[in-house]
Image (cartoon, rainbow, N blue to C red):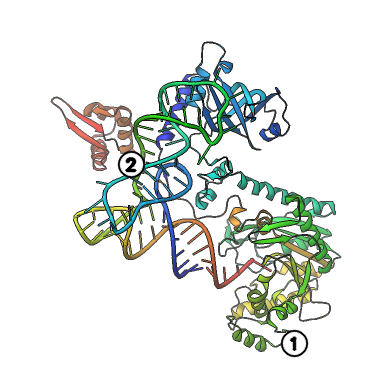
Amino acid sequence: MSIIEHSEQEIQRREKLTKLRALGINPYPAILFPVSDYSTDLKKNFEEGKNVCIAGRMMSQRDMGKASFAEIQDSKGRIQVYLNRDEICPGDDKTIYNTVFKKLLDLGDFIGIKGSLFKTKVGEISIKVNEMTLLSKSLKPLPLPKTDANGEIHDAFTDPETRYRQRYTDLIVNPHVKNVFIKRGKLMHAMRSFFIDKGYHEIETPILQAIPGGASARPFITHHNTLNVPMYLRIACELYLKKTLIGGFDGVFEFAKTFRNEGMDRTHNPEFSMMEIYVAYKDYNWMMDFTENLLEHCAISVNGSTKVTFGDHKIDFKAPYKKVTMRQSIIDFTQFDIKNKSEDDIHNWCINNDIEVDKTMGKGKLIDEIFGKYCEKNYIDPTFIIDYPKEMSPLCKEHRDDSSLTERFELIVCGKELANAYTELNDPIDQKKRFEDQLKLAERGDEEAGEFIDYDFLRSLEYGMPPTSGMGIGIDRLTMFLTNNQSIQEVILFPQMKPEVFIKKGPNLSENEKIIFDLLSKEKSIELNSLKEACGLSNKKWDLGLKALRNYGLTRVIKEEDSIIIEIINQ
RNA sequence: GAUCUGGUAGCUCAGCUGGUAGAGCAACGCCCUUUUAAGGCGUGGGUCCUGGGUUCGAACCCCAGCCAGAUCACCA
């Protein structure tokens, strides 16, 4: 809970605004400030005496009497500045140094510095300030973590709730957090340019959809007023992207925010980013090669290496990756061979092997449960699990050698799914049947099975879709791997949270009560009759308002010989 | 959804068997012209998450709730 009330420090900073304005300094000037350099570049390419102009927040200040040191933090890092009283105030008037810099500036303020580069006696690259400009005043004190001589951080700003809710603060004081989002940007860029280099087109498809298709997930529901129909936020892009291949594109991709109205935890946010790509005249074998090359390229672009540390694990994204069929994987970890087994056989095996089952589960779902419980967690380095049971994959083409399977792979890293791909189903009659099978599963009670049939998608398939392979990657999850974060909230700038409640301290004053109270606030105490006149309320309103304030404990009435005084009670 | 843990100053955290709150940094005042977790002296700052209860007395014990984190379940 947050309380909208000013702390002593915040009040002091507000008072400084008035003092600055009295000195003719606008704390929020409209200004084009001619920044010439960034902190870290200046430190990297030091040139003694170079004239520079930088801007940023003042993040520390060490006052030594007639001279001071401060650190300026810009978008790239920090650099120290040195202020000498007699250099920035050459004449008799030392106001800028003594009053403005030492008294009226605070940590967190944006200032602009013009000066020259030098090294201090201790060897720290610094800027000797000639001129200082206040660019924007900060009214709220920042958390101020400090790093000591041993590199240890003290007073780190760590509380996850506050960090996520106030990501701006997190970004200011935690450079490692900012770096995660810089890497996330690099990842998107690396992926995008990888596709564009190959001649594929980036497209955009609807987020608001009348039928949420392309995956099994619970959608968010909203309503369109003009059309007066329910609409859903997309759970996947797949069907729309395929329609563009039918339309004649032969390689398309989309970076898509998708929405699923399901649980939230350290690996699930209600809105998340995925990338889906579809390429014509390819199959899933081609897509495996493509995927491993893509991920190798991304890892190098982001971290400069294919090797990544994730928690206790070391992962190598160097291609090629191992390939294991789902059947073989289950044999490897359970000695159970699912080939040619009936639904009952598998059902019974599950019961005997500590897997919770119920009647809604079809064969595919049962196999998925076995894989999820006994196999998935064992794959640390990137591994393709291939050839999934048909029932689990209603949009995937039947396997060319085994009609009970599909040509599908998932890429597992550290026991988690990172990518999912098919040789896409392009037989419209088979597709219709698979949708209908899903519907039956849904009626049987399987909550994951698709409940909608997208007839427009079926119609589009009837015009003919080229043989195609498609693949989706969870961008958030990949970012987690590449930045060694165990929580999805750490790689999303503004993760979803319960709305914060802002409350005002004290009673909610009515309109009339406010008028009286505001007048009193200025004077602290006023004679009753003049206060009544000043507020201009009717007798009744005045009487009710005054009595209410007294009941709230905000005011007291003092009787003197000739007059009655209303006084505000300091809290 | 279940279990566990936590919520105290701007930030990080102490606070014993219940006796109406402390430290460091930050802030404010003073001293100091190359310091760097600068230093020295002094001062102010708190609905102890919320609401009930027990008690002479609650940050602490009990109940209910809110929010968050972790683990599990569910979910790609």
Tell me which amino acid carries mark 2. Answer: Leu
Seen from the viewer's position, the closer of residues A98 and A122 is A122
Q: Residue at x 74, y 79 (%)?
A: A327
Task: Name the outermost residue toward the top.
Answer: A92
Please identify the quarter of the rendering in which residue A149 is found: top right
For disc 2, the neighbor class at 10 Å (few under 14, some 14 to 19, many from 20) is some
Tell me which amino acid carries mark 1. Answer: Asn
Under circle 1, the secondary element is loop
For disc 1, the neighbor class at 10 Å (few under 14, some 14 to 19, many from 20) is few
Give the x, y percent position of residue A59: 55, 34
Q: Are marks 1 and 2 on the same chain?
A: yes
Give the x, y percent position of residue A10: 44, 35
Q: Which mark is residue A509?
A: 2
Would residue A101 appear left or right of A267 to someone viewing this image?
left
CA gap between label 1 and label 2 equals 75 Å
Quadrant placement of the C terminus of chain A: top left
Q: Which mark is residue A340?
A: 1
Q: Using the image, name the chain to which the residue with label 2 belongs.
A: A
Q: Which mark is residue A28?
A: none
The answer to whether one can see residue A464 in this image is no
Q: Using the image, name the chain to which the residue with label 1 belongs.
A: A
Lower sequence index among marks 1 and 2: 1
